[in-house]
C-alpha cells in the first residue's frame, strides 16, 4: 500500500490525518481510493473527472501534469503528495 501526504488545508476532510495509505497503481487509482473513503475530498481535488486546476499532485517530487497526469504510475515505495495551490500576495 502506498502513502499519500495530506496538506493541512485538506486534513479536515480526512479526519486530521497527515498521511494516509492508499491502494492502486496510478495516481487516479490512489485518489479514487482516498475519495471513496473520504468523499469530501472529491470536491476539493477533482473537477470534471480530472485534477482541479488549483491542485497539484507530486510523485517523487515530479508534478504529475508533466508526467502522465492521473495515469502516472506509482511504485510501491513512491512518495505521493497532494498540494492545493495557495494564493496570496
Image: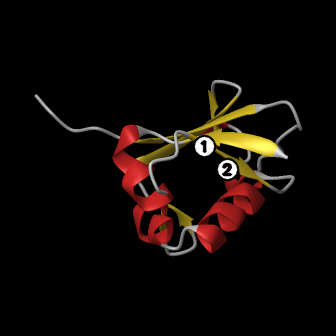
User: Image quadrant of residue 60?
Assistant: top right
Q: Would you say 45 lies left or right of 77 here? A: left
Of 41 and 37, nearer the camera is 37
The x, y position of residue 23, in whole percent, is 81, 56
Q: Secondary structure at mark 1?
A: helix
Q: For the point 80% across and 53% down, which residue is it?
A: 26
Q: Secondary structure at mark 2?
A: helix
Are the two marked residues, 1 and 2, in contact with CB atoms closer than 8 angstroms?
yes
Is residue 49 positioned above or below 9 on the image?
below
User: Image quadrant of residue 52?
Assistant: bottom left
Q: Would you say 30 lies left or right of 36 here? A: right
Q: Residues within 10 Å of mark 2 (few under 14, many from 20)?
A: some
* Residue placed under numbered mark 1 in the picture: 65
Q: For the point 44% across and 39% down, which residue is it?
A: 7
The x, y position of residue 65, in whole percent, is 60, 43
The x, y position of residue 34, in whole percent, is 64, 61
Spot the residue most to the left: 89
Q: Residues within 10 Å of mark 1 (few under 14, many from 20)?
A: some
Q: For the point 34% across and 45% down, which residue is it?
A: 9
Q: Would you say 47 lies left or right of 80 here? A: left
- Report the disc number at residue 45: none
Q: For the point 74% across and 47% down, which residue is it?
A: 68
Number of marks in the image?
2
* Residue placed under numbered mark 2 in the picture: 69
The x, y position of residue 42, in whole percent, is 50, 69
Is residue 12 positioned above or below 75 on the image?
below
Report, in whole angstroms, how far the alpha carbon at label 1 lies from the one at label 2.
5 Å
Is residue 87 positioned above or below 60 on the image?
below
Amino acid at each position: 500500500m502506498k502513502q499519500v501526504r495530506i496538506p493541512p488545508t485538506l486534513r479536515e476532510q480526512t479526519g486530521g490525518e497527515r498521511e494516509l495509505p492508499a491502494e492502486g497503481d496510478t495516481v487516479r487509482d490512489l485518489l479514487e481510493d482516498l475519495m471513496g473513503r473520504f468523499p469530501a475530498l472529491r470536491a476539493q481535488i477533482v473537477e470534471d473527472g480530472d485534477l482541479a486546476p488549483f491542485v497539484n499532485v507530486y510523485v517523487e517530487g515530479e508534478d504529475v501534469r508533466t508526467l502522465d497526469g492521473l495515469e502516472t504510475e506509482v511504485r510501491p515505495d513512491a512518495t505521493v503528495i497532494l498540494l492545493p495551490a495557495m494564493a496570496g500576495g
